[in-house]
């Protein structure tokens, strides 16, 4: 069978493992990569630039037309759902015989909305590895009407057949390693190696999908699981030999969750891999012993969430257990051992006040992370914080309908539902504060920020991003810059020298 994985924006590890499974079972696999430059996401939206650098007709749809896959698979988060629907509908027109499969977090949280699209044939709810393999067999049979685990699909009569939601895969070592070769023209995704050693999160944050996702299976099973040290090291040894890896990012929700596993892994890692890496920690679990292990193994950067600085609000509405003293200690330990700290902070939480934001500003003046990453509040389907949004009349049935359909009017990088004018000022303050000289930090107050013209703020945004990126050798900035530069050149070549790229579409 010929399978196409449709990748939108950054790489999706879910597609990489499904590709590995498909190849292992003897199927032909291609990746169709739709960039999001100047459409949305990290580059924000610039319609004219997005149109100029659009290469859909010249390459993307040409590849699809020539390849004519039997199955086209999408892995979808809420932020890209609208784009995924746009591409899926076109895919169906170009390849009417192909079956289109949607999986991912958004699909699991809003299955009725997704399956209602005429051009979508199958949706996967929850973990997809077993389901995807079964869907391939189902398509090959062509006449089966049996339910498929973790899957909804449309029968020939138009009925929706729903399979049982089985428990989570417990033995992660039974899965193949991620197929990075699915991105043949994206060298930066190999130089900047992304992997995950575990699945699931033990915490129950109200704004996160985990508290809903863990309860999807009808069968009881452990939600938090981890690959063995041997399995992860095996993957990294192979990747080190195959690619020119300069750094590794572990995308685990909490990399430091299990201290016994962590100690064993890092001891082997520093001897057999010895490549600088970045990981995600939690201030409630972090201590000096872990910092020493990370530092000795080559950890250069860590990312952790603060999200809100008011302890009462954070505990009551976000269900986060850490105290401010935990955050203070985490920052002190990271500075002591020279590990760069990325601190995530969510702006415009429901019921958030100007006093809360001023409390955060004063906290950061005394306890400055190396980089503060502010994000606008975003409501995702089935997250518990939606209840508070309704209570405060930030959300209603109409806005939730838009969110479920991927038409959320807010954005991680632009605005938030229910935000006030003061939120824009504090977003700016949090973003640029670490990049300012110490004597200027205290002077950047709310009232001062209000008087700064927007065009000057844009300058400070850009300055802070690249200055802090250079100062702390941020892997995100380097990869992001490579991504933009290479894709701009690639797109221009494709648009203006199309004959050269027609060969790329041919099946070898």
Image: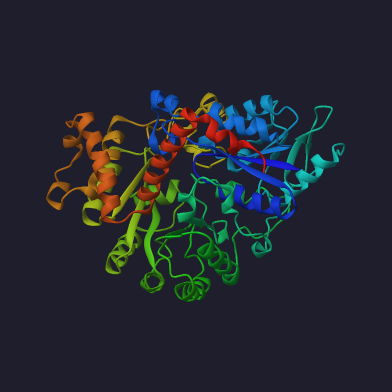
Query: Could you say which is closer to the camera, residue 141 or residue 224?
Result: 141
At 68% from the left and 55% from the top, the residue drawn is 168
The residue shown at (39%, 56%) is 303
Q: Is residue 90 above or below residue 359?
A: above
Q: Would residue 303 appear left or right of 213 to someone viewing this image?
A: left
Residue at horizontal 41 percent and vertical 73 percent from the top: 293
Instruction: State left or right for residue 310 relative to residue 164.
Output: left
Residue 176 visible to an observer of this rendering: yes
Give the image location of residue 435, x and y in percent: 22, 48
Q: Nearer the viewer, residue 229 or 411?
A: 229
Which residue is located at x 55 percent, y 32 percent? 59
Residue 387: % across, % down = 51, 37
- The reply to whether residue 54 is visible in this rendering is no
For the rendered model, the colour scheme is rainbow
Count the labels in the image.
0
Q: Position of residue 222 (x, y in %)?
A: 65, 60
Q: Is residue 223 left or right of residue 308?
A: right
**Residue found at the far left of this picture:** 439
């Amino acid at each position: 069978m010929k399978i196409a994985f449709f990748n939108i924006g950054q790489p999706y590890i879910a597609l990489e493992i499904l590709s590995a499974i498909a190849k292992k079972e003897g199927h032909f696999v291609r990746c169709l990569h739709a960039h999001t430059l100047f459409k949305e996401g990290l580059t924000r939206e610039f319609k004219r630039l997005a149109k100029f650098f659009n290469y859909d007709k010249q390459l993307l749809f040409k590849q699809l037309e020539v390849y004519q896959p039997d199955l086209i698979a999408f892995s979808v988060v809420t932020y890209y759902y609208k784009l995924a629907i746009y591409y899926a509908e076109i895919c169906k027109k170009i390849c009417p015989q192909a079956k289109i499969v949607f999986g991912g977090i958004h699909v699991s949280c809003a299955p009725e909305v997704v399956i209602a699209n005429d051009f979508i044939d199958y949706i996967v709810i929850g973990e997809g590895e077993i389901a995807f393999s079964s869907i391939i067999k189902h398509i090959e049979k062509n006449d089966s009407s049996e339910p498929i685990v973790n899957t909804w699909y449309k029968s020939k009569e138009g009925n929706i057949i729903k399979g049982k939601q089985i428990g989570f895969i417990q033995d992660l070592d039974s899965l193949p390693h991620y197929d990075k070769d699915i991105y043949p023209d994206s060298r930066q995704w190999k130089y900047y190696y992304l992997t995950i050693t575990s699945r699931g999160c033990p915490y129950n944050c109200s704004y996160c999908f985990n508290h809903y996702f863990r309860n999807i299976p009808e069968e009881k099973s452990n939600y938090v699981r981890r690959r063995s040290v041997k399995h992860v090291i095996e993957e990294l040894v192979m990747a080190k030999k195959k690619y020119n890896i300069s750094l590794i990012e572990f995308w685990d929700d909490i990399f430091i969750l299990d201290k016994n596993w962590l100690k064993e892994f890092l001891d082997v890692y520093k001897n057999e891999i010895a490549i600088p890496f970045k990981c995600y920690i939690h201030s409630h679990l972090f201590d000096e012993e872990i910092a020493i292990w990370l530092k000795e193994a080559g950890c250069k950067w860590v990312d952790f969430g603060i999200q809100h600085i008011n302890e009462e609000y954070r505990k009551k509405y976000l269900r986060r257990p850490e105290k401010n003293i935990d955050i203070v200690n985490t920052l002190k330990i990271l500075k002591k051992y020279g590990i760069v700290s990325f601190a995530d902070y969510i702006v415009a939480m429901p019921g958030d006040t100007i006093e809360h934001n001023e409390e955060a500003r004063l906290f950061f003046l005394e306890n400055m992370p190396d980089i503060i990453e502010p994000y606008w509040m975003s409501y995702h389907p089935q997250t518990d914080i939606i209840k508070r949004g309704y209570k405060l009349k930030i959300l209603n049935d109409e806005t939730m309908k838009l969110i479920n359909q991927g038409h959320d009017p807010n954005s991680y990088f632009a605005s938030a539902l229910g935000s006030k004018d003061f939120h824009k000022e504090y977003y700016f303050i949090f973003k640029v504060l670490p990049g300012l000289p110490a004597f200027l930090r205290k002077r950047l107050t709310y009232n001062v920020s209000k008087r700064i013209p927007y065009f000057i703020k844009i300058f400070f945004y850009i300055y802070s991003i690249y200055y802090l990126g250079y100062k702390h050798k941020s892997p995100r900035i380097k990869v992001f810059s490579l991504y933009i530069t290479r894709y701009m050149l690639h797109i221009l070549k494709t648009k203006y020298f199309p004959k050269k790229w027609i060969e790329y579409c041919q099946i070898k």
